[in-house]
Amino acid sequence: MIIDSHCHLEYEPMASNLTNVVKRALNNNVKYLLSISTTNESYLRILDITEKYKNIYGTYGIHPHETKNYKNLKKVEIVKKISLSKKIIGIGETGLDFYYDYSDRIIQKKIFIEHIKAAQELSLPLIVHTRSAEEDTYEILKSEKNKKDFKVLIHCFTGSKKFAHKLINIGCYISASGVVTFKKSFELANTFLSLPNDKILVETDSPYLSPEPLRGRPNEPSHIVHTVNFLSKIKNINPEVFGKITSSNFFKLFGELN
């Protein structure tokens, strides 16, 4: 069994063909899908999707790119949104993106912390996006964990090995996307090779970042098998066993699913 821990099923081209997308996932032993919120609008679509499909779950959060439009978002509103459905099992994606700086960095940090407060209150895992913001991301997570611990999943990790191990040391889980399979991702592959297996999850981030040999095409959950096969090969583990390991890690974070 494989679990796609991070996809955007409300995005096209998947949204208008979702039944077939889900069938292809199941045919590739991808049993559960977690669709990740980026805006209030995407969250409403996720609520509809999770109601229609038994094996799809969701999260609520505001992507760092979008925080300029949610400057006044508070923990109480995040908690209220999550209460709308029992199939909302995580908070995010949230975090910091200083690569594009689509939103002011101060606003990004402020809204990131509001998401963290909600994760602390609800004891739900926080799904973190971080790009070109390693030091700030780490310091915020470490500081807030010292106040009250909470679960963290770093999604689509592409950072340095040093950063990865600092995150592991404060109890974070780290997710691999199709990027790890890219031919020029030698350092990233080496980073995942160095990480403990009991801290790794897998994801597609679909419709983005299709793994080799499908790079350049729209991504979908069924493609995650290529990422699992790549990681299992470099770690010298049977792919089916590695899929079970990453699924077990998912359940440690999010709890058992019905």
Image: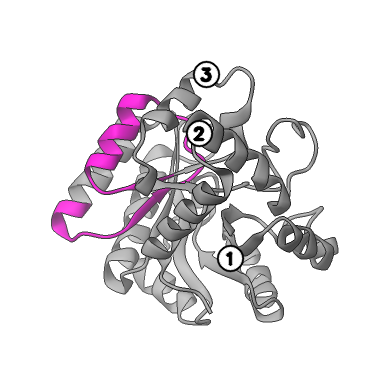
Is label 2 in contact with label 1 (beta carbons under 8 Å)? no
Residue 97 placement, left or right of 160: right
Q: Residue 186 got which mark?
A: 3
Q: Position of residue 4 (x, y in %)?
A: 59, 55
Element at badge 1?
helix
Disc 3 crowd rating (10 Å Cα; few below 14, some 14-19, many 20+) is: few
Label count reads 3
Q: Earlier in the sequence, mark 3 or mark 1?
A: 1
Q: Which label sits in the foreground, 3 or 1?
A: 3
- Which residues make up the magenta segment? 145-174
Work out whether residue 68 can be spotted: no
Disc 1 crowd rating (10 Å Cα; few below 14, some 14-19, many 20+) is: some
Q: Which residue is mark 2?
A: 101
Q: CA distance from mark 2 to mark 3?
A: 27 Å
Question: In the image, is residue 58 above or below residue 197?
Answer: below
Q: Earlier in the sequence, mark 2 or mark 1?
A: 1
Q: Residue 69 got which mark?
A: none
Q: Position of residue 37 (x, y in %)?
A: 57, 60
Q: Which residue is mark 1?
A: 40
Q: Disc 3 residue type?
A: Phe
Q: CA distance from mark 2 to mark 1?
A: 20 Å
Residue 154 placement, left or right of 176: left
Question: In the image, is residue 216 above or below residue 106?
Answer: above
